[in-house]
Amino acid sequence: MLSKKTKYGLKALTFIARNEGENPVRVGEIAESENIPQKFLESILLTLRKAGLLGSKKGKHGGYYLRKEPADILMTDVMRVLEGPIAMVPCVSLNFYEKCDDCPDEHQCSVHKLMIEVRDSTLNVFKNTTLADLSGV
Amino acid sequence: MLSKKTKYGLKALTFIARNEGENPVRVGEIAESENIPQKFLESILLTLRKAGLLGSKKGKHGGYYLRKEPADILMTDVMRVLEGPIAMVPCVSLNFYEKCDDCPDEHQCSVHKLMIEVRDSTLNVFKNTTLADLSGV
DNA sequence: GTAATCCCTATTAAATTGATAGGATTAATA
DNA sequence: TATTAATCCTATCAATTTAATAGGGATTAC
């Protein structure tokens, strides 16, 4: 299941991409338009900012803005920040590899084999989708 | 993340496929070979039996066996039984569709669009993989 | 009739998720 | 400079889900 955090984060990024203008976009504006609890959204945007995807401006007329062009923001990066590893098991994760403790030899493991294929096909989608594709900008 | 339930279930199915013979395969044998807590495994195999993927025989020399040839057991079916919907959000699920309450129009939703692609690519893997592929039988 | 096996229900501990609360900090502007 | 509007940060909490355990019931081979 996709977490609400990720869902809200994707919606927020899309909203920002569609509403970029003179001033940065306020959290309250996003929260209201997209039906997201504002405090929860604050923490999500903070995460995206710390990951370098968003920039922010404090104080009056403050808000969030994209650090790159929508066409340069890959879903691989967004998903890894919001949802964590793309792989469904740590033993096939490219960026967060961990050995299974129950599995003596992962090259003989049927789950391993299957999950590599799932990872690759999912990765292929995320690698070829940008925020521009999502937002239509 | 793949649940342990699914992971154990896949390993168990693979084990059964590889060890089919005169007698059905005992839970204890699978649990020991694959390092799975036996009581937990019992409940998983019960689920697979109720879903029609496994058959069972009680009493001495009892155990579990496959209801179909490994080559006829699709991962789509296995995954849906063990892990539930293949889609990451209910609003793109083919078999478990549910409308999002926060989303006024899902055809304009960026998350919806992305998750349809992920669903299709994952589905494509599961649709083209059978237990025979996993077990090498 | 006894041992071995699956069957079933209930319970529980730990982890995760989704959300809330409360205020600290910063910046624009009147 | 005071006020207001915004982000920033930490802590906490309730609900849910997951992984596992417990305890026995029912069935079958021998």
Image (spheres, coloured by chain):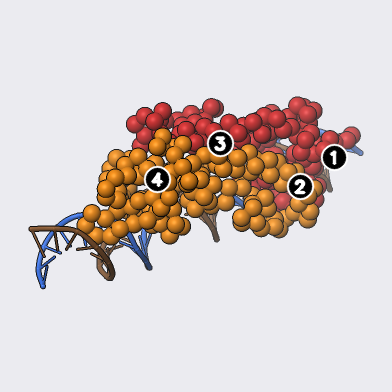
Chain colours: A orange, B red, C brown, D blue
Q: Quadrant of residue A136?
A: top left
Alpha-carbon span between mark 4 and mark 1: 51 Å
Mark 4 or 1: in front is 4
Q: Earlier in the sequence, mark 2 or mark 4?
A: 4
Give the residue at x 60% y 43%.
A123
Alpha-carbon span between mark 2 and mark 4: 38 Å
Give the residue at x 56% y 43%.
A127
Mark sitting on residue A109: 2
- Pointer 1 indicates a residue of which chain? B
Count of numbered badges drawn on the protein? 4
Q: What element carries label 1?
A: loop
Q: Where is residue C9 in the image (x, y as percent from the top left)?
A: 57, 41
Relative horizontal placement of residue B55, taking residue A78 as reference (left or right): right
Residue type of the residue flagged with mark 2? Cys
Relative horizontal placement of residue A84, taking residue B15 as reference (left or right): left
Q: Name the residue under label 3.
A: B118
Give the residue at x 63% y 38%.
A121
Can residue A83 be seen here? no
Q: Where is residue B69 in the image (x, y as percent from the top left)?
A: 79, 28
Q: Which of marks 3 and 1 is nearer the N terminus?
A: 1
Q: Mark 1 points at which residue?
A: B19
Residue type of the residue flagged with mark 3? Val
Residue type of the residue flagged with mark 4? Leu
Q: Name the residue under label 4.
A: A13
